[in-house]
């Protein structure tokens, strides 16, 4: 028998806009028409051959659509759905929340032929509840097809009512209100209830604007399908729910509002964000089975962090802890408050390492636990990290970050096996050494934001509020040979070490003594272009590209061989060579006077083909602007 649509499938959906469960519905098979991508979701027209209804697939069906399992003109069986009104129109919109594929694309669109003279079956338009009650029950001319919902008996309703009276408020909410999946919510819905797990909770923050002072905090919520949404609470609502929301707990939430998410600030993959006010209802689902999943990780390998540098997107990582520093206090410039901070170095299977800075409570609590376990090289999984270009590439925790030590997940077990068998004896390299200049500067090209040095030095206020980034084509015109061009660095964390009494080198950060240390560049040089000159600072990786050798090699040339002329000749060879620089501009205060500090973030040799193309485009822009 050929596969086909269910008879009167659309009528059944319209008569049951919000079914209590899929078991209450007859089989609903529809044909998919006009399948297309709208935003990040796939929309289609559901057809039963007689009627059509605009519809949208859930996000988890996107993969099946891309792989061809769900096709235009194909058949799908709808297992669960929500029917919404389209604002300012009399139309309905079907939001499919669960479905399965029945058939691939058919040759033609299914169109039913309605034969009114055929005896035995009479197809009638679904009736509203009050019409069904008044309908004569003796129709011997045929069979009336009705949605199952219309046949719910009164005695069953009475039983449900009696059960409700004996239930706890949370369980009563679960029975009287249908729980909506997050994927079905939109700003035009009326009443809804969601069942979600609190997977991330931010700190309470205060703010001040023209309207006065206030407080705010954010949470991230996850439902059983793994869909996430960010919820924000201000002032009274923030004070009301801050203590009530506990990380990892499951809640029923209703009476919130939704709006289109601000892409600049959103932290989860959802088109909408939620706001809860003081009238919103939040009930802990403590007496029910808490099947809502824990927070899902989307791990980024350490060697692939480059494109995220200085971006708004947060990352999750998993790695083996190599070392942990003692806690220190950093004075915040805005209010002179001391903020606890602790650094650790993490490595993964890419054989790359990265510095992760733990801040505030994470530095004191989880950080201390990691400090005590450091010699056992624990596996750590961290959610929601900010990627910056500090010291090349580094990671920092935020108020919403979550740290798990030796988590019971497959990725952690795989990483532990790799480290115990291979990684512990492998040579690890800092991520900053393996990234291209464009990756290290947040996927920026050396041909974007191109300016002359006079543009920077002629604008003293540049970098006042936040670092400003530019690209420059210039020559290294002077490197002073008498300067301290390198420092003794810890082999683990690269921080400065001091000679220990007796022998070796003491690292204050790692709180340990090593027999050897590394030499790393910290060099100041003058660069010049056709319009000006400026002093810039360059650190190890960038200085190596400018000088053409490592600090160890230059030190040997200067001291061990006693070849001062050779040392100076090496520096002279590095001058008047053209480079492309990516620089940051910040403001430093010296003797109560603000000064610009220009730091080299990346260095690259000139690609003359690309440079010529860039200059031609620049000339065209100048001609068109005249």
Image (cartoon, rainbow, N blue to C red):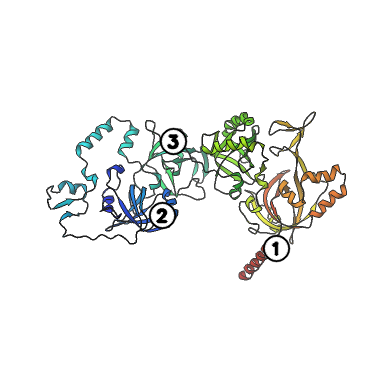
Q: Report which residue position mark 2 lands on.
A: 42
Which residue: 62% across, 30% down?
A: 376
Q: Quadrant of residue 149?
A: top left
Give percent across and percent down for residue 543: 74, 49
Instruction: Identify the secondary structure beneath mark 2.
Output: strand
Quarter of the C terminus within the rendering: bottom right
Assess whether mark 1 and mark 3 are in contact (beta carbons under 8 angstroms): no
In the image, residue 60 sits, relative to residue 369, either above or below, namely below
Instruction: Identify the secondary structure beneath mark 1.
Output: helix
For this rendering, which residue is in front, 278 or 188?
188
Which residue: 87% across, 46% down?
A: 563
**First in sequence: mark 3 or mark 1?**
3
In the image, residue 40 sits, relative to residue 321, either above or below, namely below
In the rendered structure, find residue 608 and report the number of the disc placed on it: 1
- How busy is the neighbourhood of tag 2: few (under 14 within 10 Å), some, or many (20 plus)? some
With 21 as the anchor, is 366 left or right in this view?
right
Q: Report which residue position mark 3 lands on.
A: 241
Q: Label 2 to label 1, Cα distance in Å?
A: 45 Å
Q: Nearer the viewer, mark 3 or mark 1?
A: 1
Give percent across and percent down for residue 167: 30, 30
Q: Label 3 to label 2, Cα distance in Å?
A: 35 Å
Instruction: Identify the secondary structure beneath mark 3.
Output: helix
For this rendering, which residue is in front, 63 or 218?
63
């Amino acid at each position: 028998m050929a596969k086909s649509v269910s008879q009167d499938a659309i009528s059944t959906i319209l008569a049951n806009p919000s079914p209590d469960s899929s078991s209450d519905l007859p089989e609903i098979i529809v044909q998919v028409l006009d399948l297309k991508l709208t935003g990040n979701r796939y929309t289609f027209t559901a057809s039963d051959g007689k009627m059509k209804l605009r519809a949208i697939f859930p996000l988890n069906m996107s993969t099946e659509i891309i792989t061809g399992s769900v096709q235009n003109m194909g058949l799908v069986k709808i297992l669960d759905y929500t029917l919404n009104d389209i604002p300012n129109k009399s139309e309905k919109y079907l939001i499919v929340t669960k479905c399965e594929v029945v058939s691939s694309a058919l040759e033609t669109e299914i169109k039913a032929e309605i034969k009114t003279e055929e005896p035995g079956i009479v197809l009638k338009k679904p009736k509203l509840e009050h019409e069904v009650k008044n309908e004569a029950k003796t129709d011997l001319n045929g069979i009336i097809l009705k949605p199952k919902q219309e046949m719910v008996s009164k005695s069953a309703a009475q039983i449900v009512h009696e059960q409700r009276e004996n239930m706890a408020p949370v369980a009563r909410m679960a029975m009287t209100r249908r729980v909506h999946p997050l994927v079905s919510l939109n700003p035009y819905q009326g009443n809804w209830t969601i069942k979600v797990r609190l997977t991330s909770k931010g700190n309470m923050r205060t703010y001040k604007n023209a309207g006065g002072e206030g407080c705010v905090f954010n949470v991230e919520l996850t439902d059983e399908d793994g869909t996430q949404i960010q919820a924000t609470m201000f002032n009274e609502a923030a004070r009301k729910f801050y203590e009530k929301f506990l990380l990892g707990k499951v809640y029923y939430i209703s009476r919130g509002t939704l709006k289109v998410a601000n892409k600049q600030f959103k932290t989860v993959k959802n088109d909408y964000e939620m706001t809860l006010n003081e009238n919103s209802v939040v009930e802990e689902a403590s007496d029910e089975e808490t099947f809502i999943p824990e927070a899902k990780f989307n791990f980024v390998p350490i060697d692939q962090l480059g494109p995220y540098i200085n971006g708004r997107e947060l990352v999750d990582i998993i790695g083996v802890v190599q070392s942990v520093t003692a806690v220190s206090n950093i004075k915040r410039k805005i209010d002179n408050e001391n903020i606890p901070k602790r650094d650790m170095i993490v490595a993964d299977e890419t054989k790359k390492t990265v510095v992760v800075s733990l801040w505030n409570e994470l530095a004191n609590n989880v950080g201390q636990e990691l400090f005590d376990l450091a010699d056992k090289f624990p596996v750590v999984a961290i959610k929601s990290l900010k990627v910056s270009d500090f010291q090349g590439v580094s990671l920092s925790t935020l108020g919403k970050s979550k740290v798990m030590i030796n988590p019971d997940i497959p990725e952690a077990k795989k990483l532990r096996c790799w480290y115990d068998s291979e990684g512990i004896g492998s040579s690890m390299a800092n991520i900053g050494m393996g990234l291209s200049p464009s990756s290290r500067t947040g996927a920026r090209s050396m041909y974007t934001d191109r300016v002359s040095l006079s543009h920077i030095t002629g604008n003293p206020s540049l970098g006042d509020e936040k670092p400003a980034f530019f690209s420059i084509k210039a020559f290294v015109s002077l490197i002073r040979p008498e300067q301290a061009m390198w420092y003794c660095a810890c082999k683990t964390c690269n921080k400065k070490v001091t000679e220990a009494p007796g022998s070796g080198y003491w690292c204050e950060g790692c709180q340990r003594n090593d027999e050897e240390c590394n030499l790393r560049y910290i060099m100041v040089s003058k660069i010049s272009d056709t319009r000006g000159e400026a002093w810039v600072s360059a650190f190890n990786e960038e200085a190596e590209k400018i000088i053409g050798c490592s600090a160890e090699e230059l030190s040997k040339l200067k001291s061990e061989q006693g070849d001062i002329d050779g040392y100076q000749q090496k520096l002279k060879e590095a001058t008047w060579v053209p480079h492309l620089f990516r620089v940051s501009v910040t403001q430093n205060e010296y003797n109560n006077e603000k000064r610009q500090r220009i730091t080299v973030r990346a260095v690259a040799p000139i690609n003359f083909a690309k440079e010529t193309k860039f200059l031609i485009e620049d000339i065209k822009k100048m001609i068109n602007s005249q």
